[in-house]
Image (tube, helix red, strand yellow):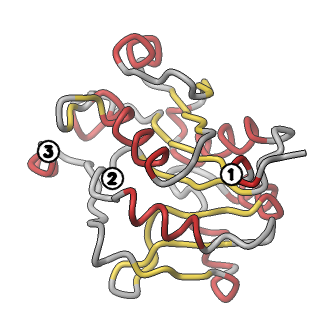
Amino acid sequence: MTRAEDEIAGLVLAAGGGRRLGGRPKALLAHRGRPLVEHAVGTLRAAGCERVHVVLGARSAEVRRRAALAGCVLVENPRWEQGMGSSLRAGLDSLAGTGARAALVLLVDQPGVSAEAVARVRAAYRDEGSLVSAAYDGVRGHPVLLGAAHWGGVAESATGDRGARAYLRAHERSITLVECGDVARAYDIDTEADLGHLE
């Protein structure tokens, strides 16, 4: 029997190689004195996710060595160069059979997403059919909660760097939007100019 707090698993997508950042993996970028991947895990845990799976790819051995990820399930994505879609598929695959009924997906390169925003999205979970997304001034963003009933469809449509975007667009009417613009900032760390967001 799954404990209620285990039903929603945190899933960090942290496999990217940081192509536009000169090949520096985003997982290892420093933010507040620790790697971004560590920050993302801490955010999910602070929001109530006890079980956290982390998808690694670029320089994964170095990420394992440098980041404190004790207690996380580390998932290798050998196809990380194919884009975020492959990492989302690997992460959802790793959750199959664990008893998790939803995945709360957080991107490693969005350190402005607060634990409070993640907790709001998590609180909107109802059952395996849930689809929940943070919104910023009404515009859908991250994190996203994917009920287990949707995992197959998401995995099927997740290609390139699009992740769950196509699936969510097709199921727009089923998504519960949770406004988070007052407690989080949804910027990405994609380019050298974006590094100014890091502390």
Q: Nearer the viewer, residue 10 or 151?
A: 10
Picture residue at 61% right of the left edge, 63% below the top: 145
- For the C terminus, give its image quadrant: top left
Residue type at mark 1 is Glu
Residue type at mark 2 is Gln
The answer to whether residue 193 is left or right of residue 40 is left
Residue 195 image label: 3
Q: Nearer the viewer, residue 179 or 29?
A: 179
First reached walking from the N terminus: tag 1 or tag 3: 1
Depth-wise, is mark 1 or mark 3 nearer the camera?
Answer: 1
The quadrant in which residue 75 appears is top right
Image coordinates of residue 39 in percent, x first then y, are 34, 39
The answer to whether residue 198 is left or right of residue 73 is left
Query: How many numbered circles are shown?
Result: 3
Secondary structure under the numbered disc 1 in the rendered image: helix
First reached walking from the N terminus: tag 3 or tag 2: 2
For label 2, the residue is: 110
